[in-house]
Image (spheres, grey):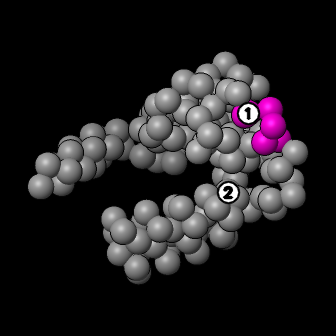
Amino acid sequence: MRPAFSDALLLETFTIARRLMGKDFASKLRSQILSRAEIMPAAEIAPHVSQFSSLVPEEDIAHAALAAAAGAKYVISNNKEFLRSLKGKLGFKCVTPKSFIKLRGEMFGVDQGRISSFREKERLEDRE
């Protein structure tokens, strides 16, 4: 399984990581993504855009088109509206990051207790 990113999704991921975790973390994450992920050219994504214009929210069309262009098995997002709009379409399994880790956790050696601890820490930080 190899993740797929577009230039726009890579920039979005980097920007969020930098805001939440700092410049050093974001740079390391970007390096990891570039070494492991497939970066899909815009020209390969563009032909898939029209099939999603009536299915998903406008701001998510590019992400859905990326998934189609990459032949993705999973679409992973915290945007529940986006996931609901894609559910059952084109063979994607639509899951949240937490659900994906639960589904595939053994493959990555992830301890489920650590996931719960991380989510609780996020909730506490959001309240501050």
- Please give the label number shown on residue 75: none
Can you see residue 105? Answer: no
The Cα atoms of the two marked residues, 1 and 2, are separated by 18 Å
The residue beneath circle 1 is 52
The residue beneath circle 2 is 5
The residue nearer to you, when weighing 52 against 10, is 52
Label 1 neighbourhood size at 10 Å, few (<14), some (14-19), many (20+)? many
Quarter of the figure with the C terminus:
bottom left
Q: Residue 6, located in which quarter of the rendered image?
A: bottom right
The residue nearer to you, when weighing 112 against 14, is 14
x 55%, y 33%: residue: 82
Q: Looking at numbered disc 2 in the image, what kind of residue is underneath it?
A: Phe
The secondary structure that most of the magenta stretch takes on is helix
Residue 39, image x, y percentages: 74, 62
x 42%, y 65%: residue: 17
The residue nearer to you, when weighing 121 against 107, is 121
Quick check: 9 left or right of 72?
Answer: left
Query: Does residue 69 belong to the magenta stretch?
Result: no
Label 2 neighbourhood size at 10 Å, few (<14), some (14-19), many (20+)? many
Q: Give the range drawn in magenta.
A: 48-53
- Which mark lies nearer to you, 1 or 2? 1
Q: Residue 51, located in which quarter of the rendered image?
A: top right
Give the vertical position of 5 relative to 97 (above or below).
below
- Determine contact: label 1, label 2, CB under 8 Å: no
Query: Under tag 1, what secondary structure?
Result: helix
Residue 112, image x, y percentages: 34, 39
Question: How many numbered marks does the figure carry?
Answer: 2
Q: Residue 30, located in which quarter of the rendered image?
A: bottom right
